[in-house]
Amino acid sequence: MNSEENKNQKKDRAEPAPGVLYLVGTPIGNLGDFSPRAQSLLKSISLIACEDTRRSKLLLRNFGIERPLISFHKHNTKSRIPQILEILKQKQSVALISDAGLPAISDPGEDLVAASKENNHEVICIPGPCAAITALAISGLPTRRFTFEGFLPKKGQERKNILIKISQEDKTTILYESPHQIKNLLKELSLVCGEERPIQISRELTKRFEEQIGPTIKAALEHFTKNKPQGELTVVLGGVGNSKD
Ligand code: SAM
């Protein structure tokens, strides 16, 4: 660390600060990715809001973190947000974690962040791994301009429209998909993009059986025909032309 960095380090603000909502990144598999700053903050926070209290309790116990937990998931978002805002108003600090990765990316954290900001509560992110960005970074596809679609609508016209939009996109597109639906998604993408479109599917990022599947939609479909899709998957699709210019 040089002297300038050292000076900045000394200026670090005490955490947790009162009345602040902290978004805290947790590992997407490998526990070694839980940052010391995240652990230290969670050890002294007033309250931790998490998607699945049982799952988070297991993770936190591994790191000796024992703080009060409340559930915050897609089925109780509406009722929980005012409760959490009230806690912030009383100058207590709250940490939001998701089942894995960065909160507010494809989970209801997005609504809590918006509500906190609307009510003038400061929101600070303690960054950690995000499956989308990790998969993009190792895809070998253009990273300079990309678009994130998360999970597509399950079915119907909305899904068809978005698939067509994705097929015409010149930027790299990142998608989340479950192992049960991946073959279906690849067949749909093959119809709208053509089977030779470049694709990289990251499976089980940061975990023991991590692998990359590609390099085309056709090859990925062949792979999942021979190998039963399992584990967590993030899809990175090349754009029209797939140009690096
Ligand atoms: N907030 C999370 C993040 O920052 O990565 C994403 C939450 S989203 C509800 C969960 C989806 O992320 C999974 O269904 C999968 O598509 C993707 N994902 C999570 N962990 C992953 C991993 N280890 N490898 C590949 N994809 C993963």
Image (cartoon, rainbow, N blue to C red):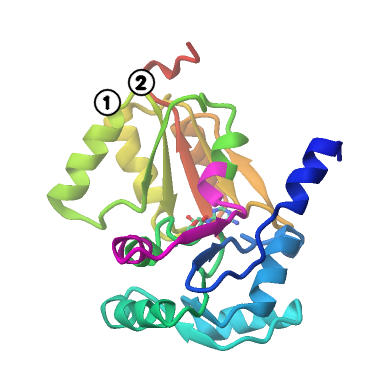
Question: Residue 97 location in percent, x, y?
Answer: 53, 69
Highlighted range, magenta: 113-133
Res. 59 in view: no
182 up-or-down from 19: above or below: above
235 up-or-down from 142: above or below: below
Circle number at residue 20: none
Tell me the residue that label 1 is attached to.
168
Question: Residue 211 location in percent, x, y?
Answer: 66, 46
Res. 185 in view: yes
- Disc 2 on helix, strand or loop? helix
Cα separation between marks 2 and 1: 6 Å
Q: Amino acid at mark 1?
A: Gln
Left or right placement of residue 231 versus residue 33 in this view: left
Tag 2–tag 1 contact (CB < 8 Å): yes
Q: Amino acid at mark 2?
A: Val
Image quarter where the N terminus lies is top right
Residue behind label 2 places its C-beta within 8 angstroms of ligand 1: no
43 up-or-down from 105: above or below: below
The reply to whether the magenta stretch includes residue 118 is yes
Question: Residue 144 location in percent, x, y?
Answer: 50, 24
The answer to which of 110 and 219 lies nearer the viewer is 110
